[in-house]
Image (tube, helix red, strand yellow):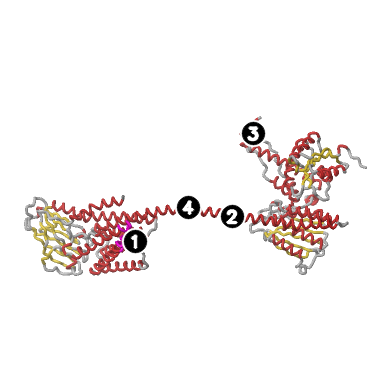
């Protein structure tokens, strides 16, 4: 039997309010030798308390929680534990919610009913690279990141008497755009890899970056919106 | 106000008419007889003949032009103060010269152009006292043109200062009076035409033209030397007079709002008649022709006056009453003139009154026109207001109707979408779930795998239905890509490999969820046909855009058994495929692929609008 080093064991946190689903998830994690359940929570409050104590490698979050949205848990986790890979555990068809989750800091998603794909595989996948990306999501990411990046108006800087805010605005690289276009057209990772003459591994890395960029983009958009509304002026003057 | 002002100007002139005839000063004498020698043009002088004054050339000339020399013996004035003497001639001409004891005291006849008509105004000729010796010879030589009302009136001989007083009164009456008439007519005529330029009302135009014609006619009195020679000028002035009367009749009908079909014809006949009688009458010397026409004009004026009086009596409207009054007065005055001036021998040199009466008519018409104009303006204002209200009302109605249409359209769209969803639920999801339920109820030992299959299919159906509601922004490639993404596991399980050659397509603007659903159904049908009937193991999906034809092609080929398209034309599967393509506005071509398998080509025409440029279109794939 292959022994697995303790630091290679994936520490998994589970946030799910449906008892039956939760127990199936726990069972699935327990059946894998390379991962263990660090904690499980059934509400935003419980998850907040758990995240204060534990630092999971992978966090699985259901979006519909009894006392709030899973999005809050995602953003809390991405702030407190930047190394933590958060995964949204969602119903199919919730692509817009998936996008919102990624914007909040999730690095992948798992559809509850995906046949033939096990929870364990998905956890490993998100740990190693990122979630599979459906054509619809690829198209949406393409559209979001293609929009002209937000900039802070010079007038704002004059008013505040400070240099303009440095807002990190990630633009899509040409290669990233190519990958997204091909995925949105229905090509698989391996087909994309061969079309672009790179390895599948490279494609996965790009996808991971793209998820990350979407999150940063969303945050910079928020900063931009806030600065436009004058919310940051007080902060700058302090 | 204007009306009042004009009446005030006109009144003194009218008042002057009461003492229009010259009173003979105590010191003066009236000469009613003279010895005349007539020389018709081209003929020898006649023998001297004693005649009564006034002497009317037209009565004796027999249509000829010529000269007449009058010799009168002047006896010294009794009880007269010292000072220059003068003779007053109410009418003399058409050209004339005066000599006393052979000495010229006026402009010489030889220097006067035949165009000159000095008979239009009274003349006062001064005789220096030094020339008079008692029992003096007064010679007046006239040159006259036929029908020009030339001749010599009764002669008043008196002290110059006395005659000067009388002369100025008559001069005022004849010349200034005409000037006033001309001024008023010109002012109101121009004013009326200005109104007409703003409001195309026939009344304004006719009145404006009539008054300007009248200005021409009356203004003739004020000019001694007309621009045309005699008799052309005489014809022109006569024609102007006829025109004025005709226009007056037309005006009356317009004011009374009487309109007949034959008016235009009658008007043309009148114009021809007036032109003919004036031209023939004057140039050919048929005086009676023109006099008869004048009589006809009076009859016409009487007719108009009669109609006006009747209308005023029946209508009891102020403007009609005023018109009837002024017309009636004018007609009476006209008759008086006609009878008195043309048929009374002693009336030579008397003024016709009609021209002064025309002021009354002119002012009446001015009042009527001002009244109508202001009424029209008022009505226009009210009309504008009503119009604005009606436009606003119509706008409201249109907005409401538009809102109703929009709502109806929206409801129709919602209904159509709802029906589509219901069909999806019922045909896809519902049939599979009820199938699964039926299997479960049978409680067959082998039921498990069947139920799993039913439920997976139901779930797949549901996913595709939900996918169709995503925003694709017209990207058919993404629709196809997503379908492939959904079918991946099923195809893998069936051992079918999918060769994907989806080239970029420009956005298909008309792509609705229903359209997405049609593409999904079309593709599913094609793929399941290939798998079931053709036993294919490889399916190639290709897309490309034909920019010249403005359409996209989706081509699906398989390596299965293929078929004879003609034999299978009626098959249900193919019918469904064709129907789905039609739903997208496209068509299907079914044939044999390069590998002998089935080839289905779907043509999707893009709308008439040129598809916008597609940035990814040049990306090399394959």
> Is B274 on the left or on the right of A16, as rendered?
left
Q: Nearer the viewer, mark 3 or mark 1?
A: 1
Q: Is residue B319 magenta?
A: yes
| Inter-mark Cα distance, 1 to 2 | 52 Å
Q: What stretch of residues is rendered in magenta?
A: B307-321
Q: Do pointers 3 and 1 mark residues of a single chain?
A: no
Numbered disc in front, either 3 or 4:
4
Q: Which residue extends farthest right?
A: A1
Give the position of the N terminus of chain A as an image quadrant: top right
The reply to whether residue B109 is visible in this rendering is no
Label 2 secondary element? helix
Residue, disc 3: A233
Could you tell me how far apart the alpha carbons at marks 3 and 1 are, in whole angstroms? 84 Å
Camera-side residue: A57 or B110?
Answer: A57
According to the picture, the residue beneath numbered tag 4 turns out to be: B388
| Callouts 2 and 3 close, C-beta under 8 Å | no
Q: Which residue is mark 1?
A: B256
Q: Quarter of the image for the C terminus of chain A: give it.
A: top right
- Mark 4 to mark 1: distance in Å? 32 Å
Does the magenta segment cover residue B29?
no
Q: Is residue B120 above or below residue A153?
A: below
């Amino acid at each position: 039997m292959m022994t697995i080093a303790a630091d290679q064991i994936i520490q998994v946190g589970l946030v799910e309010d449906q008892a039956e689903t939760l127990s199936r998830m726990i069972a699935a994690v327990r059946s894998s030798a390379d991962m263990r359940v660090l904690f499980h929570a059934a509400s935003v409050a419980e998850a907040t308390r758990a995240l204060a104590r534990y630092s999971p490698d992978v966090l699985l979050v259901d979006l519909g929680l009894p006392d709030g949205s899973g999005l809050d848990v995602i953003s809390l986790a991405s702030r407190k534990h930047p190394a933590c890979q958060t995964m949204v555990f969602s119903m199919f068809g919730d692509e817009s919610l998936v996008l919102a989750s990624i914007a909040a800091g999730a690095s992948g998603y798992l559809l509850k009913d995906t046949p033939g794909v096990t929870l364990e595989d998905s956890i490993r996948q998100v740990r190693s690279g990122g979630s599979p990306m459906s054509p619809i999501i690829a198209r949406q990411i393409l559209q979001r990141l293609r929009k002209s990046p937000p900039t802070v108006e010079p007038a704002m800087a004059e008013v505040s008497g400070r240099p303009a805010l440095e807002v990190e605005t990630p633009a899509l690289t040409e290669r990233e755009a190519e990958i997204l276009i091909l995925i949105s057209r229905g090509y698989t990772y391996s087909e994309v890899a061969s079309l672009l003459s790179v390895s599948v591994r490279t494609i996965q890395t790009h996808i991971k970056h793209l998820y990350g960029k979407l999150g940063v983009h969303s945050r910079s958009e928020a900063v931009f919106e806030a600065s436009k509304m004058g919310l940051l002026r007080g902060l700058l003057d302090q | 106000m204007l009306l009042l002002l004009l009446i005030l100007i006109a009144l003194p002139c009218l008042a002057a008419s009461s003492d229009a005839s010259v009173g003979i000063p105590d010191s003066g004498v009236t000469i009613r007889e003279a010895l005349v020698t007539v020389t018709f043009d081209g003929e020898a002088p006649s023998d001297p003949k004693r005649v009564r004054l006034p002497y009317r050339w037209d009565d004796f000339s027999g249509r000829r032009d010529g000269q007449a020399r009058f010799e009168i013996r002047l006896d010294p004035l009794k009880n007269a103060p010292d000072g220059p003497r003068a003779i007053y001639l109410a009418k003399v001409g058409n050209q004339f010269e005066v000599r006393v004891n052979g000495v010229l005291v006026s402009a010489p006849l030889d220097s006067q152009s035949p165009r000159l008509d000095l008979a239009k105004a009274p003349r006062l000729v001064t005789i220096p006292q030094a020339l008079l010796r008692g029992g003096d010879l007064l010679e007046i030589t006239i040159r006259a043109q036929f029908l020009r009302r030339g001749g010599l009136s009764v002669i008043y001989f008196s002290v110059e200062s006395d005659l000067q007083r009388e002369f100025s009164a008559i001069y005022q009456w004849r010349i200034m009076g005409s000037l006033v008439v001309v001024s008023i007519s010109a002012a109101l005529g121009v004013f009326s035409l200005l109104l007409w330029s703003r409001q195309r009302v026939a009344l304004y135009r006719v009145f404006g033209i009539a008054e300007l014609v009248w200005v021409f006619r009356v203004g003739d009195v004020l000019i001694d030397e007309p621009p045309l020679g005699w008799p052309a000028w005489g014809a022109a002035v006569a024609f102007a007079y006829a025109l004025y009367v005709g226009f007056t009749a037309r005006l009356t009908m317009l004011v009374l709002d009487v309109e007949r079909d034959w008016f235009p014809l009658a008007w043309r006949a009148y114009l021809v008649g007036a032109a003919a009688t004036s031209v023939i009458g004057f140039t050919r010397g048929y005086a009676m022709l023109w006099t008869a026409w004048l009589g006809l004009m009076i009859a016409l004026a009487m007719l108009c006056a009669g109609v006006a009086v009747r209308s005023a009596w029946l209508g009891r409207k102020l403007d009609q009453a005023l018109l009837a009054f002024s017309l009636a007065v004018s007609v009476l005055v006209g008759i008086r003139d006609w009878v008195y001036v043309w048929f009374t021998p002693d009336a030579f040199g008397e003024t016709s009154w009609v021209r002064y009466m025309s002021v009354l008519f002119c002012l009446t018409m001015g009042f009527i026109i001002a009244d109508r104009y202001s009424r029209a303006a008022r009505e226009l204002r009210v009309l504008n207001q009503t119009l604005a209200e009606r436009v606003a009302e119509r706008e409201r109605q249109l907005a409401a109707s538009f809102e109703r249409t929009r709502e109806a359209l929206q409801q129709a769209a919602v209904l159509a979408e709802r029906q589509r969803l219901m069909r999806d639920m019922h045909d896809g999801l519902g049939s599979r779930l009820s199938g699964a339920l039926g299997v479960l109820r049978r409680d067959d030992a082998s039921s498990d795998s069947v139920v799993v299959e039913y439920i997976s299919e139901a779930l797949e159906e549901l996913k595709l239905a939900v996918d169709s509601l995503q925003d694709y922004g017209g990207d058919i490639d993404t629709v196809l890509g997503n379908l492939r993404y959904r079918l991946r596991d099923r195809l893998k399980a069936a051992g079918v490999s999918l060769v994907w050659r989806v080239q970029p397509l420009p956005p298909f603007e008309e792509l609705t969820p229903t359209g997405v659903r049609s593409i999904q159904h079309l593709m599913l049908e094609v793929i399941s046909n290939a798998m079931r009937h053709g036993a294919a193991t490889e399916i190639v999906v290709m897309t490309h855009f034909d920019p010249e034809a403005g359409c996209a092609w989706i081509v699906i080929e398989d390596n299965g058994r293929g078929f004879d398209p003609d034999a299978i034309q009626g098959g249900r599967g193919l019918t469904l495929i064709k129907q789905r393509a039609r739903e997208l506005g496209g068509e299907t071509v079914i044939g044999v692929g390069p590998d002998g398998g089935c080839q289905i080509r779907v043509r999707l025409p893009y709308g008439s609008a040129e598809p916008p440029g597609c940035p990814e279109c040049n990306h090399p794939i394959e």
